[in-house]
Amino acid sequence: EIVMTQSPATLSVSPGERATLSCRASQSVASNLAWYQQKPGQAPRLLIFGASTRATGIPARFSGNGSGTEFTLTISSLLSEDFAVYYCQQYDNWPPLTFGGGTKVEIK
Amino acid sequence: QVQLVESGGGVVQPGRSLRLSCAASGFTFTNYGMNWVRQAPGKGLEWVAFIRFDGSNKYYADSVRGRFTISRDNSKNTLSLQMNSLRPEDTAVYYCVKDWGSGWCFFDYWGQGTLVTISS
């Protein structure tokens, strides 16, 4: 099973600042990595797939990078609606499909 | 637009069974793999089960294999999850999730979720 590790667990950021979230895989997943955003009481929403391709309707301030075992999600200038929990997920080697534990982006 | 509407959640005692359903609309259901993903209260996401577009392949998380069964009815655009021998640790919101397709199992549409509580 591929273990996905996200860091930090919580990220405190001021509106307008940049946020960089990390996701590490226990073995290479190539570029088969997705990122999701989840707000309280809502289902997750797909942000990024293929490590760097934005899903339909996702603003350009969200960008993904990386391959192999190290990945980042960057939010270039945080808006109030971006404060949420973010999860990475690998779909390279499965079953099982595995998620990281999440990073909560909170208002500083 | 794509809609996934789960039903069937509730409170059940440990050891009992429950069946979840998901009504899909707004896309060609027969073309896509479908999944169940769950989230325990205050916790992260856990993939539970996958079924291929034609029902020919099914995969499960170790935590549910042998107790849960995923199925689909392509004539009714419906996904189901039969859950037997339920345990307190199965308590979670269960999401019906559509995958991208073409063999790529990441998730582009999610239902709103249905809460399953296992408690005596």
Image (cartoon, rainbow, N blue to C red):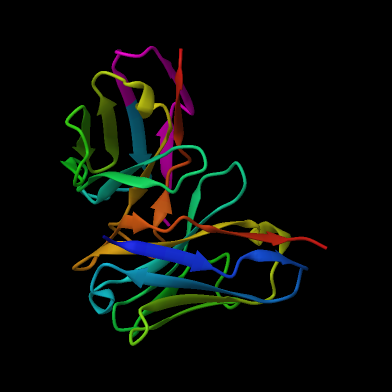
**Image spot of residue A51 (x, y percent):** 22, 43
Residue B70 place in picture, x, y as percent: 47, 77
**Residue plotted at (57% across, 43% down):** B43
Question: Residue A26 or A59: which is nearer the viewer?
Answer: A59
Image label count: 0
User: Compared to B53, does B37 lie above or below?
Assistant: above
Q: Quadrant of residue A15?
A: top left
Residue at the spot 75% in from the left edge and 73% down from the top edge: B15
Tell me if I can see residue B61 in this picture: no
Q: Quadrant of residue A69?
A: top left
Residue at position x 37%, y 22% from top? Answer: A80
Q: Is residue A48 magenta?
A: no
Q: Residue B113's x, y, as percent? A: 50, 57
Q: Position of residue B47 (x, y in %)?
A: 46, 59
Stretch in magenta: A1-20
Asked if B13 appears above or below B54 in the picture, the reply is above
Q: Is residue B17 left or right of residue B47?
A: right
Which residue occupies the foreground of this view, A62 or B104? A62
From what the image shows, is residue A102 above or below residue B1? above
Is residue B19 in view? yes
| The N terminus of chain A - image quarter | bottom left
**The magenta stretch spans residue A6:** yes
* Residue at the spot 62% in from the left edge and 46% down from the top edge: B41
